[in-house]
């Protein structure tokens, strides 16, 4: 049984099907990739999983248990944490306070006796932003602020981590280190679901990749298989005839 | 049967007028994105202007109507849009709230100054004395005209919005303001027109209602709550549902008048019906989705160190001792009031400044605290103060619950509705119309603060203790949590925070603080009456602390200073009855340019003096937008 399983999830915004019958799983110990062109529905799927968006149809399960009726905070308490494509940092707080708030929220409901201050320092160290910890986050460059969001999510001590384009705004070197961090985290038993445009990064860290296009899943498999898939190439380049009729059907 | 029919017709008439008022509210809200709290006050002002022309200057009704409805009202609406609302657009909803509330108070002040309420006034009905018989029920022409007007408004709005260029432009602006501008539309002209239209509808409703309701500044201003209660059925968007809501409300009121007993508790239900209706509808509204992807980053003001707080506290207490000892009793009373209101305003610093929530009923909590404290040992004991806090806190928790699931606007409106409800159902009952509750001054372990000077110093001490309490919260985990929740509720929820519970907690805490303020306020006054807690007082308190600077305890101190000694001194120079309303209203309308109030201005000057770079407003914006717009074509493999 997978830690997270998404079953036939559909979301309709007026006349547009943002997601159509999407299936997906994420398991502990590995990074699962979710790619697709902009507008494919990746962020919408994240919102459905974390409870910020009600699906029109389908189910989200955590360890087999249907969580569709649960609110965002209740799902978080099952061990989900996420970052946001368009940042949702606590802009008026420093980086350290951003992480500390998360650790304090966690202790409040988990009542696990963890020490928020210690957790905060550990996580800051882990993500490598201790040097920037006293800066206000709304004054930070985007790449750094994304790392603060990652640190904040980790401070909630999740089992499932959903990352929405965490790598954008990072330079080559930083991306490299970031990839290593993701692999390490996965090896420690975390299930990671990664949305990312940096294809190199995705191919390097993911064991399984799901590809979305216009709200539908068009491919699933290990990196090598995805690279070779003609449908995926068509979706990205948008020239193949196969992609065009899909669009007609979806945008009713 | 005849009786029932008569009530039904009355209900339809009332509902028709409510529909006119509510549709005006919806039109301005949807096209300009600003909820106009002054909608009722604008209607009230126009009804008084109509009275001035029609009754005082003896103009014929058609001429006076044309002058008000087609000249004064649209002009007034357009001017308000141009000079006030244009600055507000694009800033957060809090600023729009303060500006329209400021306008509301200012218009009340204006009307009270020009048309003294001590002088009786009446507005005649249209075609007074004429009526027709419909199934054995007399219906006046005025009533028929009211119904016809609602029909005309419905048809005209429908045609305007769907069949004319202007209407299509209006709807385009609702959908996407910037895109409309790019396509050659003129959003600013469209909003000016929607404000003109909204004001016309408010004026029409005011004029139709005034003969029945009486020329009362406060009652006519209520119209905004009634209109809102109707509009909320259509979730402030749908005009047909708004009309349905208005009709339901009108009928409900008519049957309440007809069938509920005319004395006792239930007799107060009729004037409270819009508010009861409102809470009922709120319970059935779907929970709003958490918005994500907004521009984050808040302004924040430096939190003083404990040493600074300690020094300031001692200085305040000593200074107030010295000043109090040298003042005459009238001057001293204004100083005590300043401190008492400062204590009350601290509760708003916690709620609105730190927590980002709004309360338009803070004086209601003060009143609840005062009443409870008075009932227990006349408010003079620590137990009375604790009970005041407990009672006000509990009420705060209960009334905030239905609205906190929704957005800030709904909370603001339901707290305003609650304030009016409490005026009608609670305070009038307790005080029995004009009566007061006697207070003893505070005493603890044998030490009594009975003298005026001693009590003023006590108030200074209480202010400092409460300020320290608020600051302790600000520095601790709960304060951090509030800042986080203000910046991004969605992120907090995905970290496992129960937003509703946290909001209820801060609301209850703030209400409890206001309750404590009530106990000390009562002791200062010696006796309190229902007038002290009337809904506009809550607005005055909120606006003045905003002007002072709602993000800081210093702002609460300044706000108290304005409301107590400030207006006391000003009143000696300017002789105006409604000085507080005019002053607070005017001040709040200018707040759009400086959302952190006077404290923000001062700290801005200090920063410049110290040559410290100011905090950047937002750091993360440009790149995000570009990322959104580009369809990144990343080649695979």
Image (spheres, rainbow, N blue to C red):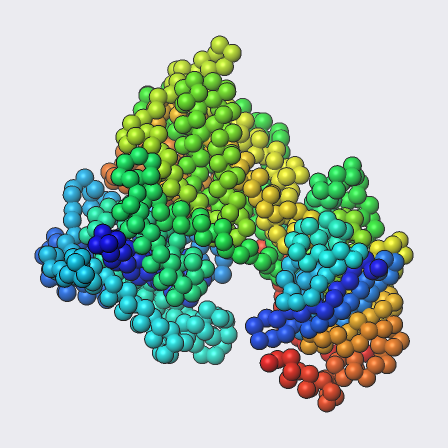
> Residue A244, percent across and down?
69, 86
Location of residue B72 by image quarter: bottom left
Question: In this orientation, which residue lies closer to the viewer: B223 or B445?
Answer: B223
Counting labels gives 0
Question: In this orientation, which residue lies closer to the viewer: A21 or B467?
Answer: A21
Q: Is residue B255 above or below residue B562?
A: below
Asked whether, in this view, residue A121 is left or right of residue B123, the answer is right
Question: Of all residues shown, which one is farthest toward the top?
Answer: B446
Residue found 78% across the figure and 39% down from its top: A112
Residue found 34% across the figure and 24% down from its top: B437
- Residue B193 appears in view: yes
- Residue A97 appears in view: no
Asked whether, in this view, residue B586 is left or right of residue A95, the answer is left
Q: Is residue A134 above or below residue B521?
A: below
Asked whether, in this view, residue B348 is left or right of residue B256, the answer is right
> Residue A127, percent across and down?
81, 53
Question: Of all residues shown, which one is farthest toward the front?
Answer: B1
Residue found 80% across the figure and 53% down from its top: A159
Q: Is residue A56 above or below residue B606?
A: below
Image quarter (top left, top right, bottom left or bottom right) of the C terminus of chain B: bottom right
> Residue B277, percent across and down?
40, 50
Residue found 64% across the figure and 46% down from its top: B498
Question: In this orientation, which residue lies closer to the viewer: B41 or A147?
Answer: B41
Image quarter (top left, top right, bottom left or bottom right) of the N terminus of chain B: bottom left
């Amino acid at each position: 049984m997978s830690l997270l399983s998404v079953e036939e999830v559909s979301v309709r915004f007026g006349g547009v099907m943002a997601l159509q019958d999407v299936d997906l799983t994420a398991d502990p110990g590995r990074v699962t990739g979710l790619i697709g062109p902009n507008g494919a529905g990746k962020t919408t799927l994240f919102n459905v999983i974390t409870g910020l968006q009600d699906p029109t149809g389908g189910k989200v399960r955590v360890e087999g248990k249907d969580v569709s009726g649960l609110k965002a905070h209740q799902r978080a308490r099952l061990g989900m944490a996420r970052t946001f494509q368009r940042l949702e940092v606590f802009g008026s707080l420093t980086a350290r306070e951003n992480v500390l708030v998360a650790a304090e929220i966690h202790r409040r409901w988990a009542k696990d006796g963890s020490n928020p201050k210690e957790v905060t320092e550990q996580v800051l160290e882990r993500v490598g932003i201790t040097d920037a910890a006293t800066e206000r986050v709304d004054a930070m460059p985007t790449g750094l602020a994304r790392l603060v969001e990652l640190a904040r999510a980790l401070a909630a001590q999740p089992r499932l981590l959903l990352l929405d384009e965490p790598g954008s705004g990072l330079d080559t070197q930083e991306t490299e280190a970031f990839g290593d961090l993701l692999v390490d985290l996965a090896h420690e038993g975390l299930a990671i679901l990664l949305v990312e445009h940096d294809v190199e990064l995705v191919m390097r860290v993911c064991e399984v990749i799901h590809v979305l296009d216009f709200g539908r899943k068009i491919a699933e498999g290990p990196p090598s298989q995805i690279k070779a898939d003609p449908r995926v190439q068509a979706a990205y380049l948008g020239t193949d005839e196969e992609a065009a009729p899909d669009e007609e059907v979806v945008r009713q | 049967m005849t009786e029932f029919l008569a009530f039904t017709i009355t209900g339809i008439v009332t509902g028709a007028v409510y529909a006119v008022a509510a549709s005006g509210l919806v039109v301005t809200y949807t096209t300009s994105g600003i909820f106009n709290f002054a909608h009722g006050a604008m209607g009230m002002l126009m009804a008084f202007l109509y009275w001035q022309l029609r009754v005082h200057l003896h103009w014929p009704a058609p001429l006076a109507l044309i002058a008000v409805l087609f000249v004064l009202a649209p002009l007034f609406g357009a001017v308000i849009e141009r000079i006030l609302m244009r600055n507000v657009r694009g800033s957060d909803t809090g600023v729009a709230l303060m500006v329209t509330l400021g306008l509301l108070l200012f218009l009340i002040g204006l009307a009270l100054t020009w048309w003294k309420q001590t002088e009786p006034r009446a507005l005649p009905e249209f075609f007074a004395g004429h009526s027709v018989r419909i199934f054995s029920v007399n219906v006046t022409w005025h009533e028929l005209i009211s119904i016809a007007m609602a029909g005309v408004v419905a048809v005209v709005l429908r045609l305007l919005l769907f069949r004319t260029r202007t209407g299509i432009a209006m709807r385009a602006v609702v959908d996407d303001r910037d895109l409309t501008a790019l396509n050659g539309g003129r959003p600013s002209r469209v909003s000016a027109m929607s404000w003109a239209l909204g004001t016309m509808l408010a004026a029409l409703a005011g004029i139709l209602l005034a003969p029945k309701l009486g020329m009362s500044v406060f009652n006519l201003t209520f119209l905004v709550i009634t209109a809102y209660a109707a509009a909320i059925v259509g979730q402030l968007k749908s005009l047909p549902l708004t009309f349905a809501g208005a009709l339901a409300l009108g009928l409900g009121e008519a049957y309440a008048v007809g069938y509920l007993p005319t004395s006792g508790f239930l007799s107060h239900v009729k004037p409270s019906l819009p508010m009861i209706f409102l809470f009922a509808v709120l319970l059935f509204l779907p929970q709003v989705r958490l918005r994500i992807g907004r521009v984050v980053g808040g302004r924040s003001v430096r939190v003083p160190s404990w040493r600074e707080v300690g020094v300031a506290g001692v200085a305040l207490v000593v200074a107030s001792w010295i000043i109090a000892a040298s003042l005459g009793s009238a001057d001293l009373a204004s100083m005590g009031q300043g401190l008492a209101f400062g204590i009350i305003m601290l509760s708003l610093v916690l709620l609105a400044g730190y927590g980002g929530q709004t309360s338009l009923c803070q004086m209601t909590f003060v009143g609840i605290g005062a009443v409870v404290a008075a009932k227990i040992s006349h408010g003079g004991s620590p137990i009375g103060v604790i009970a005041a806090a407990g009672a006000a806190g509990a009420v705060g928790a209960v009334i905030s619950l239905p609205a906190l699931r929704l957005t800030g606007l709904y909370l603001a409106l339901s707290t305003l509705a609650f304030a009016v409800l409490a005026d009608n159902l609670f305070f009038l009952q307790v005080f029995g119309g004009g009566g007061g509750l006697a207070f003893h001054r505070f005493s603890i372990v044998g030490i009594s603060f009975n003298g005026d000077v001693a009590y003023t110093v006590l108030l200074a001490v209480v202010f400092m203790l409460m300020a320290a309490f608020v600051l302790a919260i600000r520095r601790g985990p709960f304060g951090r949590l509030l800042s986080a929740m203000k910046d991004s509720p969605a992120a907090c929820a995905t970290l496992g925070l129960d937003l509703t519970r946290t909001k209820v907690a801060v609301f209850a805490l703030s209400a409890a603080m206001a309750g404590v303020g009530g106990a000390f306020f009562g002791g200062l006054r010696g006796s309190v009456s229902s007038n002290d807690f009337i809904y506009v007082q809550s607005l005055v308190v909120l606006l003045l602390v905003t002007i002072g600077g709602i993000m800081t305890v210093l702002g609460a101190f300044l706000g108290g200073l304005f409301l107590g000694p400030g207006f006391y001194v000003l009143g000696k120079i300017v002789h105006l009855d409604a000085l507080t309303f005019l002053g607070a209203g005017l001040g709040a309308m200018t707040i759009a340019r400086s959302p952190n109030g006077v404290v923000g201005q001062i700290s801005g000057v200090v920063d410049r003096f110290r040559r410290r770079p100011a905090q950047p407003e937002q750091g993360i914006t440009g790149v995000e937008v570009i990322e959104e717009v580009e369809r990144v074509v990343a080649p695979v493999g």
